[in-house]
Amino acid sequence: MAVKVLFALYPLLQGDYRAVEQALSTLEASGVEHRVYPTHTELSGEEEAVFRALEAAFKAAAMEGATVMWALFTNACEAKDPFRRPERLKRFPPLAIARKALEGLKAQSVLDIGTGTGVFAEAFASLGLFTVGVDPRSDRLEVARAKVKKARFLEARGESLPFPDQSFDLAFFGLSLHHLDPIPALREAARVARRVAVLEWPFRQEVALPEGQTDLREQEEGPPLERRLSPERLQVLFQQALGSPPVILQEEDFTLALWENPQGI
């Protein structure tokens, strides 16, 4: 069985960190997957290997003096990532969409707003761009950090981005703008980037199939029609937020709106 453990070591002699150093060195030698944070360490893997690594780390620390260790065990089996289901990736091919969003733009950096588990951030990073993904959900960001090593991820909301003006070449909303307050989110995106791209679901009601028939694409989860942003609605939102409409690219399975900052360089 796979487990995940959050644990920390505390030497009883305050200020003596040799015990912690010994524990981390032993953990490093164990080969068990782990990440060290300022307040604790996370360990994950098969149950027996994790228990052996914890025992060895505690014994190594205890050789330096009295030591206390706490540990929280959880099931490490991850739920399937809804953003990476094969049918969703087929419908919204990340690399092809990333290239469409960048077409004609000499870009070196991208901000992926509402990054989720980093699907589109991974595509942009694979093209050699400095990529940052932001999302308000820390659980999704943890998955993104584990799966996408070439991008950076930060907890933040699209309506209030913690970046200076014109920090990026492209600000990208990958199926995320309809989850946000669109006017302030678009204004923030235009403040930090010289191009804004919005990927949106096609504005159509998904067809209900007759009983007994299955079609993965038709059963794809997505927002109801009233939550989706139609091309016409996107035009209005950009006009209200930024003073000019976007260029709309319509494909069978998605809509992509592109807007250029007239003051961008």
Image (spheres, helix red, strand yellow):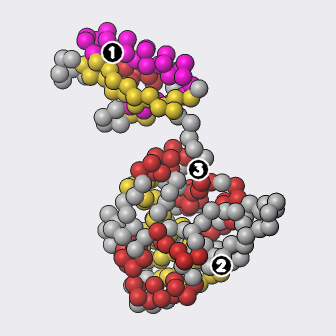
SS at mark 3 in the image: loop
> Which percent across, then down, holds residue 27?
44, 22
> Which percent across, then down, holds residue 121?
53, 59
Category of crowding for the residue at label 2, using alpha-carbon neighbours closer than 10 angstroms: few (below 14), some (14–19), many (at least 20): few
Q: In the image, which is nearer the foreground, mark 3 or mark 1? A: 3
Q: Which mark is residue 204?
A: 2
Q: Quadrant of the C terminus?
A: bottom left
Query: In the figure, 138 relative to 260: above or below?
Result: above
Lateral position of residue 215 relative to residue 187, left or right: right
At label 1, which amino acid type do we have? Ala
Residue furthest left in the image? 14
As for residue 75 lying within the magenta part, the answer is no
Query: In the figure, 86 relative to 73: above or below?
Result: below
Lateral position of residue 164 relative to residue 195, left or right: left
Category of crowding for the residue at label 3, using alpha-carbon neighbours closer than 10 angstroms: few (below 14), some (14–19), many (at least 20): few
Whichever of labels 3 and 2 marks the residue nearer the N terminus, that label is 3
Whichever of labels 1 and 2 marks the residue nearer the N terminus, that label is 1
The residue drawn where x is 33% and y is 27% is: 8
Q: Nearer the viewer, residue 128 or 153?
A: 153
As for residue 57 lying within the magenta part, the answer is yes
At label 2, which amino acid type do we have? Arg
Q: In the image, which is nearer the foreground, mark 3 or mark 2? A: 2
Q: Which residue is mark 1?
A: 61
Disc 3 and disc 1 in contact, CB within 8 angstroms: no
Q: Quadrant of the N terminus?
A: top right
> The magenta stretch spans which residues?
41-67
Whichever of labels 3 and 1 marks the residue nearer the N terminus, that label is 1
The residue drawn where x is 59% and y is 76% is: 225
Alpha carbons under labels 1 and 2: distance apart: 61 Å
Q: Which mark is residue 81?
A: 3
